[in-house]
Every structure is written in C-alpha cells, then in structure tokens.
Image (tube, rainbow, N blue to C red):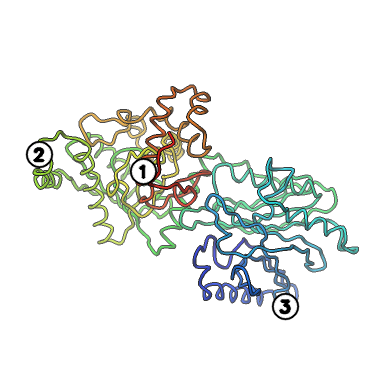
C-alpha cells in the first residue's frame, strides 16, 4: 500500500489543471503495474490523479489503483472531497457516486481514500457529509459469497497533514471504525513536506478491537510488513512509547525545512542571528535539516543592540558549528537618516526609525542570498505574526517562515528540547527578556502582554474562533486587554498576506488554511 496521490505528491494544486501532468501520473501507474507481473509478486495499491472518462463534471479524479499481474485491476474513486482548512479538493476532482468492494488474491477488501474514512457517525459529534463510504462498503459485505465474506479488511490510503495530536486522532478514529465493523483496518499515510504542509507518515494497522497492531515510523520513510488479524484474535505487537508533542513538532519543522529547500532546488540557508531565542531556534532546526556546512549565520548589530546580541549569536554559531559573520548596520543606518532627514525633520524618533533597522538587515540578507544561492529563513514566531510585531520587508524577508506557526511559549519549549543532550542554544539566550532591540532599553512587553498571557488568548481566537467574552471569562483576563490583542490580530492581516510560507504544525496556521479579507471592518 502506498499513500493517496503517491504518483504526484499531495498537494499538486493547479498542476491538476494540466492534462500533461495528469497523463504523466497515469503513466507512472502503468510502470508500477508492470512491476507486479510475475509469480509471487505482491499486489500494489497506490494513489494517483487520473483523468475522468465522463463527458461532464470535473476533468480529474482522485483514485486508489489496485495493480496485480502487470495490470490495473481495480479503481476506487474518492467520494468525499474535503473543502475546509488547507483542503480544496472540490476545486479539482470529480467525486465518486458509488463505492465497491474488490478482491485481492482471493480475498475481499474495502478500499478507501483518506477523507472517505473520516465521516463515521459514531465517532464524530457532527458528520460533515451526508454519506459514509465505509458504511456503504460494509453493507455490501453481507452480500458476498463464501469464502469472500470472511474476515473484513479495510484499506485506507491517505495524505493526512500533521498538526498537534493528529496522530492520536487518526488512530482513535480508524480504531473506532474497525471496532464498529469488526474489521482489520490499515491506514497508510504520506510522509514528507510540500510547501506549508508536513506529512508525518505514522501509518498503522488496527485489529477488530480497535487496538493498534503495528505502526510505522513518524517523519521518515518506512516499510512495514504484517499479517492481518483473523477472527477475534488480539493481534497486538509491541508498540513504541508515543513521542512528546514537542519532539513531534521539532521533527516536523526539521522535515518541513529540509523538504522545502530540497524540492525548491536549494541546499543552503542563511539566517540573521540576533542573539535572541527565535533566530537561535531556527538555526538549530536548519542545522539538523540541512547540515552545519549548509547554514550561514549573520549578525547585524546596531547602536541599540546589547553586547550579548553578538556574543550570544557567536556562542550559538560555535555550538552549532556553522559559519558566522558580522555585518554592522550603524553606517548604513546613518546614511538612511541623512537621506531621510528632509522628510523626518521636526519629528521624534519612532516607528519609522525602528523599522529602518530590520529593513536594512533584510536587504543585507537578500543580497547574501542572491550572491551565494542560500535561501533566507525568517525567524518570526506565531505570536509576533499574529499581533503584527514584525516588520514588512524587514525581519519578514525570507523564503520560509520556519516557526511562523509556533507560539513564543512553544519556542522556549522547543529550544529546551534542542538542548536535550547538550547545550546548543546558550543559556543566556534562554533566560534574557525578549527584545527587538530597535530602541534603547526596548522589551517585547513594552508592546505586548507577557507571552504566558498573550499566547492562550491568541490560540483561543485564532484556532478556536472564540469571542472576546468567552476568552475573558475562560482565561480570567480583563476584557479590555483581550480586545486590544484581538484588534492587533485583525489589523495585521495585510502583513500576514505578504509573509513567507509558514510550516504548518497547528490545526489552524497562518497561510493557505486561514482565509480572511485584508480590507474588512474589525469585529472587535
């Protein structure tokens, strides 16, 4: 079994509008089918886009192709096409109107594709679709002749993106389906990252009691062979302890960074190192993803940078074993001030002068990127992106927002995880108050609440769509403060629309899965 859309990768988006692309995917299926020819060769189940044969409707379908004896023996077309969050399958695919059982080497099987297994009425409090393809397939089982109507086997091929606690949701959901229908159920999931989406693999099989029999590795390719469960046998195998969500998030960000650069044709990354915790964490992730020889750190101190900014960045670079250079911006900043003096005359030092500094740094990083072919990784976290505590064309400059879906409090947890075996991120970086260092004595708390207060407010609003009143009551936070925070979120939509792609690790990240207008009256 191979994942959903395995021949093309998920998510191909508007590539599906190109007939040549879909045809090449079909040719790949034929090549795979040829590999099943010959005695003793296994059957193969593989996902692929495929052209529609009907004269009406969409021109492409999402299929699971069963290949055996050198031929494509059976096609199961996906019925439920998700249209929420990051998914937009209704835009491209024609949904199936029916599902059918098939036979593999003398055994009946129920084949389904990802979402088709996510509509069990006994598991979810509310069904998203009026039909349940698995339920329909199980109804057909009773009409099978002996011995085909023996032990039930449900096969599901998926491209299910990672987010916090998603692996447990999949296992519980497929386990509930298996238990309800007294079947062995197998889910094979894509692994790897495409743009913002990270796929964690973590394929598994469950027995008719809903218990996991065997599972594949997370965040890396794996091959698992097992014997399916017959009757009421327990069929349990020894399971590894589940990784912590911090460990999973780390692995997801490493995989997302590695695949983004590799699939875009790049090998190296350059990062502005401020001595702060955000850039330190991004550098640590980049080193694990790309190798220390492929990461360049650049310190760009100004008159407002503390002495620890450079020394902490240098220590980080030494700990990681990466190249590190210093490019002071004092003289460049002075030149900007001179040129802008006619426009700034008679005004006080303020936001314009502060933002000049990250924009100078952004220009330097992009120049280095152009010269060396290394991609710039942005270092802003989700808390900053949410509140607009970031500078367009400045610290937002870059090709990929590695931690753009990681709240500041989670940044600290991930940084401690980076230090789990030895010091990578300096202790001084972990303990000093966070600051943008764009004016004398500046601290993040000058503009934002403490992150321990801020992050739960943001999570409730962004990921749970809770109201001001609900957040205030549930978190025992002053309603005025909640309104101030949410106002910042809504005013900053224009910034996020111009941000680099964000690696998605939460259920609701900024980017393709969160669609709000820029020009809209505030609801707060």
Q: Position of residue 166 (x, y in %)?
A: 59, 45
- Which residue matches tag 2? 345
Is label 1 in contact with label 2 (beta carbons under 8 Å)?
Answer: no
Q: Position of residue 213 (x, y in %)?
A: 72, 49
- Which residue matches tag 3? 38
Above or below 17: residue 274: above
- Which residue matches tag 1? 380
The answer to which of 300 and 338 lies nearer the viewer is 338
- Residue 265: mark in rendering: none
Of badges 1 and 2, nearer the viewer stands 2
> Dividing the picture into quarters, in which one does residue 293 lie?
bottom left
Compute the Cα span from label 1 to label 3: 54 Å
Q: Residue at x 15, y 33 (%)?
A: 348
The answer to which of 198 and 507 lies nearer the viewer is 507
> Dividing the picture into quarters, in which one does residue 53 lie?
bottom right
Name the secondary structure under disc 1: loop
Is label 1 in contact with label 3 (beta carbons under 8 Å)?
Answer: no
Residue neighbourhood size for the residue with mark 2, other residues' Cα within 10 Å, grouped as few (<14), some (14–19), many (≥20): few
Q: Residue at x 47, y 31 (%)?
A: 456
Left/right of residue 442 with respect to residue 479 in the rendered view: left
Compute the Cα span from label 3 to label 2: 83 Å
Report the residue that reaches farthest toward the right.
Answer: 146
Q: Position of residue 188 (x, y in %)?
A: 65, 57
Name the secondary structure under disc 2: loop
Above or below 390: residue 195: below
Of badges 1 and 3, nearer the viewer stands 1
Q: Quick one: label 1 or label 2, which is nearer the N terminus?
A: 2
Q: Quick one: label 1 or label 3, which is nearer the N terminus?
A: 3
Q: Position of residue 223 (x, y in %)?
A: 63, 59
Residue neighbourhood size for the residue with mark 1, other residues' Cα within 10 Å, grouped as few (<14), some (14–19), many (≥20): many
């Amino acid at each position: 079994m191979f994942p959903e859309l395995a021949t093309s990768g998920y998510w191909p988006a508007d590539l599906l509008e190109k007939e040549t692309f879909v045809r090449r995917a079909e040719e790949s299926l034929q090549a795979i089918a040829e590999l099943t020819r010959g005695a003793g060769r296994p059957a193969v189940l593989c996902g692929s886009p495929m052209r529609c044969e009907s004269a009406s409707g969409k021109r492409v379908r999402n299929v699971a192709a069963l290949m055996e004896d050198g031929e494509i023996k059976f096609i199961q077309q996906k019925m439920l096409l998700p249209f929420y969050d990051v998914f937009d399958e209704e835009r491209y695919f024609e949904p199936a109107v029916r599902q059918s059982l098939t036979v593999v080497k003398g055994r009946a099987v129920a084949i389904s594709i990802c979402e088709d297994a996510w509509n069990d009425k006994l598991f979810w409090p509310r069904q998203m679709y009026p039909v349940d393809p698995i339920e329909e397939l199980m109804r057909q089982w009773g009409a099978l002749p002996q011995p085909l109507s023996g032990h039930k086997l449900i096969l599901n091929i998926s491209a299910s993106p990672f987010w916090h606690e998603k692996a447990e949701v999949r296992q519980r959901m497929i386990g509930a389906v298996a238990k309800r229908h007294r079947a062995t159920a197998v889910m094979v999931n894509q692994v790897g990252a495409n743009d913002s989406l990270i796929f964690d693999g973590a394929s598994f099989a469950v027995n008719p009691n809903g218990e996991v029999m065997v599972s594949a590795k997370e965040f890396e390719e794996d091959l698992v062979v097992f014997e399916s469960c017959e009757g009421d046998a327990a069929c349990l195998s020894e399971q590894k302890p589940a990784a912590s969500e911090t460990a999973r998030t780390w692995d997801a960000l490493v995989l997302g960074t590695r695949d983004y650069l590799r699939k875009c044709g790049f090998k190296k990354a350059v990062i502005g190192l401020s001595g702060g915790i955000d850039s330190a964490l991004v550098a640590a992730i980049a080193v694990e993803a790309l190798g220390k020889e492929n990461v360049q750190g650049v310190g760009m101190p100004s008159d407002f940078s503390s002495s620890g900014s450079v020394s902490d960045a240098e220590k980080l670079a030494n700990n990681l074993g990466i190249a590190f250079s210093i490019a002071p911006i004092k003289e460049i900043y002075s030149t900007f001030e001179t040129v802008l003096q006619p426009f700034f005359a008679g005004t006080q030092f303020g936001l314009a002068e502060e933002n000049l500094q990250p924009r100078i740094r952004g220009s330097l990083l992009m120049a280095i990127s152009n010269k060396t072919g290394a991609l710039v990784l942005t270092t802003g976290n989700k808390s900053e992106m949410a509140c607009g505590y970031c500078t367009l064309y400045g610290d937002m400059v870059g090709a990929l927002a590695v931690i753009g879906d990681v709240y500041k409090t989670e940044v600290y947890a991930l940084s401690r995880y980076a230090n789990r075996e030895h010091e990578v991120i300096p202790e001084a970086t972990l303990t000093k108050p966070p600051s943008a260092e764009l004016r004398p004595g500046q601290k993040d708390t000058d503009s934002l609440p403490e992150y321990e207060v801020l992050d739960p407010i943001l999570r409730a609003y962004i990921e749970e769509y809770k109201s001001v009143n609900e957040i205030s009551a549930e978190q025992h936070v002053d309603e005025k403060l909640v309104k101030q925070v949410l106002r910042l979120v809504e005013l900053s939509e224009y910034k996020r629309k111009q941000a680099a792609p964000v690696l998605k690790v939460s259920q609701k990240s900024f980017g393709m899965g969160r669609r709000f207008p820029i020009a809209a009256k505030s609801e707060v």
